[in-house]
């Protein structure tokens, strides 16, 4: 991951300003939701090794990356309050629901988003997911499905 990650738990306007400095407002791409501890990626034990990047989720959008990542931040923040009895439905709804279930174990302060503008986001997401599965023998913890493209099966021999 290349650029400085965006801290999820910050003022929405500050988040959008930082996001705008990284990506053109209409550009498509992929993004990684990561778990950090003390400002560094937290290693996550996976089936076949240790993910030292702390990747919880790999996503993509063919639309505006700015909008999708802004919606992700909104959904995570909306579902971060420990006193909530039911999840909030907003923004990136499925990730909000997934985060609601783990918010007691993964504090909102420890979530960061890396973004990568890509002209072919479906292919880039598929490749990122397949690389993850190739390394760890399973999808990232919050991903529920593989990408849209058929992988290069030879890497699994």
Image: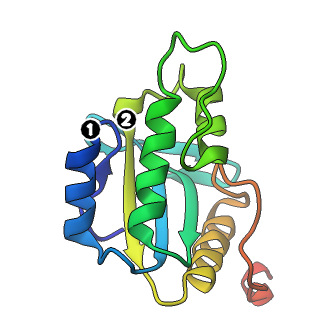
Count residues near mark 2 (Cα–Cα under 10 Å), then give few for <14, some for 14-19, many for 20+.
Answer: some
> What residue sits 43% from the left and 34% below the top?
77
> What residue sits 52% from the left and 53% below the top?
51
> What residue sits 75% from the left and 54% below the top?
144
* Quadrant of the image containing the C terminus: bottom right
Query: Mark on residue 24?
Result: none
Query: In the picture provided, is 51 more to the left or to the right than 146?
Result: left
Total numbered labels: 2
Seen in the picture, residue 3 relative to 49 is either above or below; the reply is below
Provide the secondary structure element on which disc 1 rests. Answer: loop
Q: Which residue is mark 2?
A: 110
* Quadrant of the image containing the N terminus: bottom left
Count residues near mark 1 (Cα–Cα under 10 Å), then give few for <14, some for 14-19, many for 20+.
Answer: some
Query: In the picture provided, is 136 more to the left or to the right than 21?
Result: right
Report how far apart the C-alphas of labels 1 and 2 lie in the structure: 11 Å
Q: Is tag 1's residue or tag 2's residue first in the polypeptide sequence?
A: 1
Query: Mark on residue 10?
Result: 1
Provide the secondary structure element on which disc 2 rests. Answer: helix
- Quadrant of the rendered structure where residue 64 is? bottom left
The residue at the far top in this view is 83
Task: Return the residue nearer the eye: 136 or 130.
Answer: 130
Seen in the picture, residue 87 relative to 114 is either above or below; the reply is above
Seen in the picture, residue 151 relative to 137 is either above or below; the reply is below
Whether residue 61 is visible? yes
| x, y percent for residue 125 | 59, 75
| x, y percent for residue 57 | 57, 54
| x, y percent for residue 143 | 68, 54
């Amino acid at each position: 991951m290349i650029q400085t990650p965006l801290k999820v738990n910050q003022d929405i306007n500050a988040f959008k300003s930082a996001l705008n400095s990284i990506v053109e407002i209409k550009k498509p791409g992929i993004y990684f939701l990561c778990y950090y501890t003390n400002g560094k990626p937290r290693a996550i034990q996976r089936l076949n090794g240790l993910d030292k990047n702390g990747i919880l989720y790999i996503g993509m959008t063919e639309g505006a990356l700015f909008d999708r990542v802004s919606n992700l931040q909104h959904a995570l923040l909306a579902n971060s309050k420990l006193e909530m009895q039911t999840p909030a439905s907003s923004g990136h709804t499925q990730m909000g629901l997934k985060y609601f279930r783990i918010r007691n174990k993964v504090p909102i302060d420890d979530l960061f988003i890396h973004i990568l503008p890509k002209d072919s986001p479906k292919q880039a997401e598929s490749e990122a997911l397949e690389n993850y599965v190739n390394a760890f023998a399973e999808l990232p913890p919050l991903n529920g499905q593989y990408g849209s493209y058929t992988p290069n099966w030879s890497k699994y021999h």
